Image (cartoon, rainbow, N blue to C red):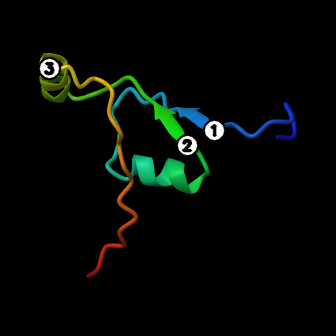
Amino acid sequence: MKEFGVKPKIAWHCDPFGHSAVTPELFAKMGYEALFFSRVNDDEKAWRKENKLMEFLWQPSFETPTG
């Protein structure tokens, strides 16, 4: 906001080692409306490609672990 005068709504998560299940929750809590990432498990990617489901909504759970 300080540098460009705008608040970004879409995040790009560059992570060469994959993403945690909590990733969408963290980005949602930071105020982002969408997240772009490129690394997906090979089996997941093959299944999604075969079923034409490469775009998807990765919903945050917002669940607090109990223990």
Identify the residue position indicated by label 3 in the image: 46
Horizontal and vertical percent for residue 52? 20, 19
Callout 3 secondary element: helix
Residue 13 is left or right of residue 1, and the answer is left
Q: How many marks?
A: 3
Horizontal and vertical percent for residue 5? 86, 35
Q: Residues within 10 Å of mark 2 (few under 14, many from 20)?
A: few
Q: Nearer the viewer, mark 3 or mark 1?
A: 1
Q: Residues within 10 Å of mark 3 (few under 14, many from 20)?
A: some
Q: Quadrant of residue 43?
A: top left
Identify the residue position indicated by label 2 in the image: 33
- Residue sitting at x 42%, y 47%: 24
CA separation in Å, label 3 and label 2: 26 Å
Callout 1 secondary element: loop
Mark 2 or mark 1: whose residue is earlier in sequence: 1
Identify the residue position indicated by label 1 in the image: 9
